[in-house]
């Protein structure tokens, strides 16, 4: 297939294979540094393996030049089953679309998007949900998505916090610790109850949590689940920490002058520019236990300070979790919209909370 602009580029689409890993890294590095922050990825793992680690049921598509075979574009679609309007449905998530800067505005992104949408719909059927998470202000991605999405389904706020420089105040009523196998039933029950009214939540069992925690390309896990328990030993809150930087680390090459001045005060970016990013996932708390979850969050910011220099999160701004992830007014955050192609039989009269974990 092909498209034309001022110069026509002929290209071919095919399914991605593990052999494309090196070319995927090169494609990511080829994107021009723009804006206030100039960043490039540093992979510590095969790029294709890294993608499948985050999304085990995944298919990729690449655009290549027919003569040389050079990879000039790529995109992913991953599959799972999630709650939507009170029903467990097959879902397909479109993500990771990128086109080499030399070949943009020639229809490549549109055809990559069409390939994966067609593949997704053929697999999950007409009753499945196809969705994507697009940062607000990304007009190019919204333009590509406009060829397939039918509804806006809600928003997620993404942000980061630095690690604590001092231990949090002691809470005599709460103890934080790493979860053990015998805790996973309580954790699964807590998660499932907390997110019962959230769209796109994946229900958990002790086995699914154990599999997720045990899945690692290293000699030891890179995901850890922590819980908060009260004086009588009841688990009242929990959150997972993932050491993302062990898979792919972001290296900051340049900050704009305002961000350089800000960084002198808050020191989010270290002198060598290497961001050892952690993220929190699968966060919940029992009714009336918001303070326990807040304590767990602050404890992680302190106790994990030598294993990472930033702690990332995603949250529906209407969720009570927003009270935990309170970033300073000067700390940048980004807002992302969920766009979906939904079954005709479902209603969009009221937007439910969106799961971000």
Image (spheres, grey):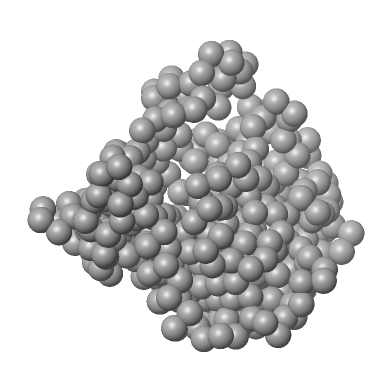
Q: Residue 194: tell me if it is visible.
A: no
Q: Quadrant of the C terminus?
A: bottom right
Horizontally, is 104 left or right of 54 in the view?
left
Indicate the position of residue 334 as horizontal and vertical percent values: 63, 41
Question: Which x, y percent locates residue 170?
Answer: 78, 39
Check the image and name the residue furthest to the front: 6
Q: In this view, does 108 lie to the left or right of 228?
A: left
Q: Which of 230 and 302 is in front in this view?
A: 302
Is 212 left, or right, of 197 in this rendering?
left
- Identity of the residue drawn at 64% across and 32% down: 332
State the image quarter where residue 226 is shown.
bottom right
Q: Which residue is drawn at 71% across and 59% down?
A: 154
Front residue of 152/213: it is 152
Q: Which of 224 and 199 is in front in this view?
A: 199
59 is higher (above) or lower (below) than 41:
below
- Vertical arrangement, residue 84 with respect to residue 269, above or below: below
């Amino acid at each position: 297939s092909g498209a034309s602009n001022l110069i026509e580029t002929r290209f071919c689409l095919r399914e991605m294979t593990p052999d494309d890993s090196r070319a995927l890294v090169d494609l990511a590095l080829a994107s021009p540094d723009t804006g206030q922050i100039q960043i490039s990825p540093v992979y510590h793992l095969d790029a294709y393996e890294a993608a499948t680690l985050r999304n085990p049921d995944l298919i990729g598509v690449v655009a290549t030049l027919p003569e040389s075979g050079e990879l000039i574009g790529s995109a992913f679609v991953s599959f799972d089953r999630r709650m939507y309007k009170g029903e467990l449905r097959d879902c397909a998530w479109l993500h990771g679309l990128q086109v080499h800067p030399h070949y943009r505005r020639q229809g490549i992104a549109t055809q990559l998007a069409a390939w994966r949408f067609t593949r997704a719909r053929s697999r999950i059927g007409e009753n499945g949900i196809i969705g994507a998470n697009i940062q607000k202000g990304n007009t190019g991605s919204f333009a590509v998505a406009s060829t397939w999405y039918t509804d806006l389904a809600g928003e997620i706020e993404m942000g980061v916090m630095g690690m604590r420089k001092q231990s949090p105040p002691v809470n005599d009523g709460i103890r934080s610790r790493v979860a053990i196998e015998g805790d996973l039933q309580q954790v699964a029950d807590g998660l499932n109850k907390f997110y019962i009214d959230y769209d796109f939540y994946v229900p958990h069992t002790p086995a699914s949590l154990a599999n997720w925690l045990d899945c690692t390309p290293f000699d030891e896990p890179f995901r850890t689940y922590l819980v908060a328990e009260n004086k009588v030993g009841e688990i009242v809150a929990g959150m997972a920490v993932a050491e993302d930087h062990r898979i792919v680390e972001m290296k900051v090459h340049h900050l704009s002058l305002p961000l350089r001045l800000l960084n002198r005060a808050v020191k989010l970016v270290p002198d060598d520019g290497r961001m050892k990013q952690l993220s929190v996932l699968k966060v919940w708390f029992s009714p009336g236990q918001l303070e326990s979850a807040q304590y767990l969050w602050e404890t992680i910011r302190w106790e994990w300070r030598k294993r990472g220099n930033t702690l990332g999160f995603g949250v529906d701004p209407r969720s009570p979790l927003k009270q935990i992830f309170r970033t300073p007014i000067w700390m940048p955050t980004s807002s992302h919209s969920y766009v979906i192609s939904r079954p005709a039989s479902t209603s969009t009269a009221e937007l439910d909370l969106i799961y971000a974990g």
